[in-house]
Image (cartoon, rainbow, N blue to C red):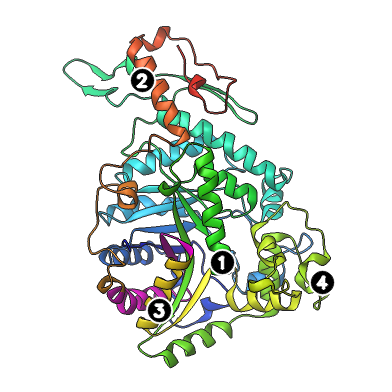
Amino acid sequence: MAPLILGVFQYFFPNGMSGQSWRHPDNRAVDYLDLDHWLRLARQFEDAKLDFLFLADSYGYPTIDGAIPDVALRDAMNLPGADPSIIVSALAAATTHLGFAVTAATAFEPPVANARRFSTLDHFTRGRIGWNVVTGSSQVAASALFGIPVTPHDERYDMADDYLDLSLKLWEGVWDDDAVRADKAAGVYVEPAGVHPIRHDGPYYRAEGIHMVEPSPQRTPVLFQAGSSGRGREFAARNAECVFLQGTTRAAIAAAVRDVRERAAGYGRDPGSIKFLVGMTVLTAPTRAQARAKADEMHAMSSPEGAAAVYAGNTGINLLALDQDRPLSQIQASGEQGQSNIDRFREAGAAGAPAPLVRDILEEIRRRGLRGGLIVGDPTEVADQIQSFVDETGVDGFLIEPHLTPGTYDDFIGLVLPVLRERGLARTEYAGATLRESLFGVGHAHLPADHPGAVHRAARQALADLAVPVGSRAMMTRSGASRGGAGSAAP
């Protein structure tokens, strides 16, 4: 088994993944607006040779029937929160190899502005940036905040396809590799023939002109995706390089991995080229009893009211208003919010067990929040569970989700990581200079040739071969043959 990809999951707000963990005396997540807090974490993760820091983000927050429940404010449930992209440059300056993945929603900001931000971050991280592409979470609250209508779930992914197509044209299709000369003696900073304007006339977005930022080390940030609904999987199969799964059972995760790989083959992609990561909270200690005590402490820090607020904010469903002794099928969900966290509780359990009752769903969320998996045990037991998890599901690694920051990471790095290294399951040194090389191997700093975005490189090269000055070049037109096809750039 190859070394696992190991990332770190963090929200940019004062709480942990569930309950009232911010109140714990050892939880430093409350220092989330202190840059020194993040610098310490980044250095710790790099010293441990972890792959990247994954920064989750959302404009949404829990609401029930349009109102923020008091418990959401008291327990700091996604509130308050700040913009995590702002700190990335500072963390990159304090590290050399650690990568950074930043969440940005396609629903609330124009693609040109987002593309410029990620190109800038790719420069200032020296090629260590990734974009977690989401369509939005807590959609009702976030849409109300921006004063826009709530878009149906599947259509949000249609929009995201178009959003990403335009972004890829900007990153891959405008600048030749050698367009920037910065030749003071010759008086040429940019060679005009090396810049190729694009025109995008998609079903949702239009743009005409050039990408303002010169080519960055990766050009396109590593593309992460975290939706596991049917439409989300289709988006992942077409676009994602890394898929973040928040599964329930090992069987469900294995099925999701197989499904996305099969769909990816339909887009002409190598199914094995997509990396799958699972969110996992690891509670460990030198003994099993000590680890169990940590789990009991975590579970005790949540209430049913808080759990209901978290679930309502994500899905629009108030569990407390439903018949507690019936399954979730008692209602017809709108499909406008977090479909993944509706589907996971509608489905039957292992071995044909019936779907959980509402009271069971509420209790699971009280104990786990919306985190991914939970492993509890001494270091050897944890390593055994990690290894069997990978064997049974086919995933490539994990995002370590916190209960306490930095305590959860201290324990994982100090106790579990040495055992994983003994088994060859964790890296001992970094490979390559960019995040994409860290994940896919040295020499793979750019999108692979079978990714749909690579077609824009070919279109750019076709224009470069013509050597037509930029001032006399007609704007490109979009081919009607297929979205993102070679006609996205033409002389």
Q: Nearer the viewer, residue 423 or 5?
A: 423
Residue receiving disc 1: 251
- Which quadrant of the figure contains the N terminus? bottom left
Task: Tell which tag, 3 or 4, sits nearer the viewer.
Answer: 3
Cα separation between marks 2 and 3: 50 Å
Mark pair 3, 1: CA separation: 19 Å
Q: Position of residue 20 (x, y in %)?
A: 57, 78
- Labels 1, 2: front one: 1
Front residue (pair 342, 299): 342
Question: In this rendering, which labeled residue sits more in front, label 3 or label 1?
Answer: 1
Q: Given the current orientation, which residue lies at the most extreme left position?
A: 185
* Picture residue at 34% right of the left edge, 58% below the top: 51
Q: Residue at x 42, y 6 (%)?
A: 472
Instruction: Tell me if I can see residue 302 in this picture.
Output: yes
Q: Which mark is residue 461?
A: 2
Nearest to viewer (mark 2 / mark 3): 3
Q: Is residue 59 magenta?
A: no
Mark positioned earlier in the residue sequence (3 or 4): 4
Asked whether, in this view, residue 336 is left or right of residue 403, the answer is right
C-alpha distance separating marks 4 and 2 = 59 Å
| Amino acid type of the residue that numbered disc 1 sits on in the rendered structure | Ala
Mark nearer the N terminus (1 vs 2): 1
Residue of label 3: 382
Query: Residue, x 38% and y 44% (percent of image)?
Result: 121
Q: Which residues are magenta?
A: 393-419
